[in-house]
Image (tube, helix red, strand yellow):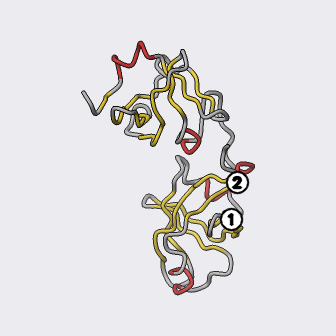
Amino acid sequence: MLSEYLLIGQILRPQGIKGMVKVRPDTDDPWRFEELEYVYLENNKKYEKASIQDVSVRDDGVYLRLNGVSDRDQAEKQRGLMLYIDRAHARKLEENETFICDLIGCHAVTLEGKEIGIVTDVLQPGGNDVYVIKTPKGEMLLPALRHVVPEIDVEKAIMKIDAARLHEVAVCSWE
């Protein structure tokens, strides 16, 4: 089951004396914060809505103030909090796009349905994403290439892999 909320950032520290905080954006578009009216803060598996004020996007991060926070002491209490949005306000995906969080936990299987392992992470080193798959033999790194991974069904948590192509591109910890 897909989570209703998507992580978009983490509060790193207070900024200044008027309640601003520095946020590490966990999105490929930090300017997205300027469009948001509110975020959700997760507390014991419950999500609380908090409106956003005074957003500034800079090279080193996003700076913002959440409603009701007006001084550094209040902002300090927010250090480490994770910021989420609900799926209804998430960016619309193009065809063949998937949110990274929806890939984590997918079962990697061959085209014939044989289990390979579980996707535990998605790396973004540059040219293309790399799936980290935990297999019974160890860790496998697999580039996100359409001819190797022709189908992903996040609703069913299944990633189909062309096993005949694995030897061409996969890096395995056991080899």
Residue 73, placed above or below residue 79: below
Is residue 167 left or right of 20 when viewed as pictured? left
Q: Nearer the viewer, residue 26 or 15?
A: 26
Among the 4 quarters of the image, the one containing residue 31: bottom right
Query: What residue sits 41% from the left and 37% below the top?
Result: 134
Q: Tag 1 or tag 2, which sits nearer the N-term? A: 1
Question: The C terminus appears in which quarter of the rendering?
Answer: top left
Q: How many residues crowd around disc 1 within 10 Å: few (fewer than 14), some, or many (20 or more)?
A: some
Is residue 163 left or right of 69 when viewed as pictured? left
Q: Nearer the viewer, residue 164 or 28?
A: 164
Query: What residue sits 45% from the left and 40% below the top?
Result: 122
Tally of marks: 2
Q: Nearer the viewer, residue 63 or 68?
A: 68
Query: What residue sits 48% from the left and 81% below the top?
Result: 16
Q: For the residue labelled by badge 2, is the local secondary structure a helix, a strand or a loop?
A: strand
- Tag on residue 47? 1
Q: How far is the residue under mark 2 from the one under mark 1? A: 10 Å
2 or 1: mark nearer the eye = 1
- Tag on residue 62? none
Q: For the residue labelled by badge 1, is the local secondary structure a helix, a strand or a loop?
A: strand
Q: Amino acid at mark 1?
A: Tyr
Residue 171 place in picture, x, y as percent? 31, 28
Q: Amino acid at mark 2?
A: Asp
Q: How many residues crowd around disc 2 within 10 Å: few (fewer than 14), some, or many (20 or more)?
A: some
Q: Are marks 2 and 1 in contact (CB under 8 Å)?
A: yes
Question: The N terminus appears in which quarter of the rendering?
Answer: top right
Among the 4 quarters of the image, the one containing residue 81: bottom right
Residue 48 place in picture, x, y as percent? 70, 68
Residue 175, placed above or below residue 90: above
- Tag on residue 86? 2
Query: What residue sits 54% from the left and 75% below the top?
Result: 78
